Image (cartoon, coloured by chain):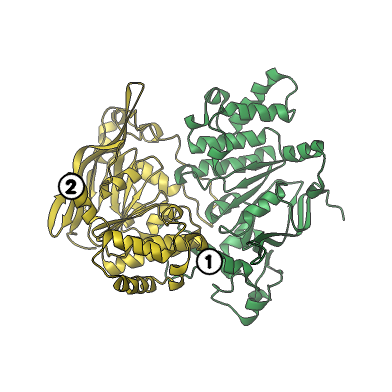
Amino acid sequence: MNHNNKLLFIKNLTKIFSAGSFLFKSNIVAVNNVSLELNAQRAEIFTLAGESGSGKTTLARIILGLVRPTSGTILYKGRDITQIKSAKDWKWFTREVQPISQNPFDTFSPLNKVETYLYDTAINYNIVTNKSEVYNILDEKLKAVGLSWDEVRGKYPNEFSGGQLQRLSIARAIITNPSLIVADEPVSMIDASLRMSIVNLFKNLKEQFNVSVIYITHDLATAYYISDRIAIMLRGSIVESGPVEKVLNAPLHPYTKLLKQSIPEPTIDVQWEEEIQLSVTEIKEFTASGCKFAARCPYVMETCKTKEPEETFVDERAVRCYLYK
Amino acid sequence: MRSNPLSIVKVEELKAYYVSESYGINSVVKAVDDVSFEIYEDEILGIAGESGCGKTTLLKTLLGTIKPPLSIFGGRIFYRIEDEYRDILSFREGELRDIRWKIVSYIPQGSMSVLNPVRKIKDTFLDFMEAHRPDISKSEFDSLVKNYLGALGLPTEVLDSYPHQLSGGMRQRVTIALSTIFKPKIVLADEPTTALDVVVQRGILQLLRKIQREEKNTLVVVSHDMGVHARISDRVGIMYAGKIIEIGNTEEIYTNPLHPYTRYLISSLPKIGDKAYRTGVPGSPPSLSNLPAGCRFQDRCPEIKDICREEEPSLVEVNDNHKVACFLVSKGEENYES
């Protein structure tokens, strides 16, 4: 099979972590048989949504080449990223795929001026051949995120607000002209009032620079706003995926429905009626056989508790639920 | 709507500043600057605003935990204790300890750092009882805790667990149970759901509302998320740069927001089913140690007038349930024509 026309090709990817001592060993399947593809021709924003412990960050770390999957295939532009050995190939891969982390205060050391990160990225990845050009490049990238070289020069991270630092980390990520950005909860630490200005930047990256973005979040409202496609993760598995308008406007899986109903929207027209059930300890849901939502699902059937549902295709999307067999 | 709600807390002209000195230069951060408002009996009051607007400092002073560098530069905080309004800022430490957890209690932000990691939940409850209610016997307290957890819908098995064995949402609910077990009249909650996922957040908010509806006490919820306030608050106060700039019934605030900042806060949140372009609030808030003359929102305001740079607007009543501090409202449009 030729996967060269795919930017990212993931098939049956699984990652198992072992926890506990060897007597009481338990295996946690952080990523369970996940498949997804990103098209190379047209940039898109793909959202991985789910609660904490859903495996979305582990999946992101596998995509960034930081964690080795236990089994399955992951190809970036047709190349198996688990087989990248030489420093030269690794440099190619890290130039192509750039991360943005949740906490912008982690991205920049408080002891260094922020410009050193921008400068070093440009030099280390040979973006400029001549050192005098570097400031033009940096200014151009900073302008793309609404800042300028004059605002940044000589300053330390503590002189910026969280929102500005997150803009800087986006500027740093696009210095290498990547094809894919993996952003893990990029706005969850940003005030609600500034969130949209950061979210809009990702939209710009896609439209102006043709960069694909894997947007990892638990905030479905911003996911709806920026993404083209979405995958809902629950305890390692993708339970529903497809075009964002389909999945969020008319969710099929009971878990997606619960997520959607639980978003507090800034309007007084909706009120929560029924009380909801929460899981007491997470470990039980991880190790449960069958559908991981069975213990909390209002439509639970006997089969749900024993056997994990297969993927079925309904109305342009893939869903794992026995209700749609 | 209730007529003549009874105030349980009255805050008058409160000024709480952080004072620090380095290299002989004094810097004063005006975190809460000349704030007056009332908190009623049997209500949920929401306090909204960006980080650094002074909402946590306001809660700290309401609780009477004023430690350097924070100090009070003026104003009073009256609590109604046994039908008498008493200024807690004049209380001695012993008197403050007497009202804490019985009259006023506090739900902190990060539940991970509240519960002792090396003690089981039941031991934490016991420590708590010994510190605050030594008059209760241990067996009495045991059944009190079990009944209370049952009433809140928490499984009693959590008592035999260590904090790390519980999910984040369950830890936060245990913290809420701990803060409300002595049936305080006022509960102050600082960002109770900020680090939590939406489904867990919903569970926590429903629990808080359930406790308030049953006890008919007063809950003050601080959150930067206007979506949270729409779900649980009866009234909402919006803080900006150390001031309350708008306060009113939740319905009034969401259907008829008057301050440009409040309008931004509500309209900047995206909604499912609506992909229309949205922007955040432009710019950033002023430094609390170097405030401009006039309105504090002037540099970010889309409707700025000359007067906004000269005078500071005060909080004026729009109707019985709504107050706002903005010249767009307090000085009618005719003043600006020329």
Q: Residue furthest top?
A: A132
For label 2, count other residues whose C-alpha is less than 10 Å away and answer few (under 14), some (14-19) or many (20+).
Answer: few
| Point 34% across, 72% down: residue | B142
- Residue B222, position as x, y percentages in the image: 36, 51
Q: Colour of chain B?
A: yellow
Q: CA distance from mark 2 to mark 1?
A: 43 Å
Amino acid identity at mark 2 = Phe
Q: Would you identify the image quadrant in which residue B177 lies?
A: bottom left
* Residue lying farthest to the left in this orientation: B84
Do discs 2 and 1 share a chain?
A: no
- Hey, which quadrant is residue B229 in on the image? bottom left
- Residue A266 in view in this figure: no
Residue B180 in the figure: left or right of residue A92? left
Q: Is residue A133 above or below residue A167?
A: above
Please tell me the numbered disc located at residue A166. none
Question: In the figure, B204 relative to B93: above or below?
Answer: below
Task: Tell me residue A222's x, y (percent).
Answer: 54, 51
Q: Which chain is indicated by disc 1?
A: A
Specify the label residue B91 is tagged with: 2
Q: Residue A318: in sight, yes or no?
A: yes
Q: Position of residue B53 (x, y in %)?
A: 36, 40
Q: Is residue A261 above or below residue A303?
A: above
What element does badge 1 sit on?
loop
Q: Which chain is green?
A: A
Q: Nearer the viewer, residue B149 or B115?
A: B115
Chain letter of the residue carrying label 2: B
Q: Position of A240 compared to A7: left or right?
A: left
**Residue A242 percent coordinates (x, y):** 66, 60
Query: Which residue has dot 1 on it?
Result: A281
In this orientation, which residue lies closer to the viewer: A154 or A78?
A: A154
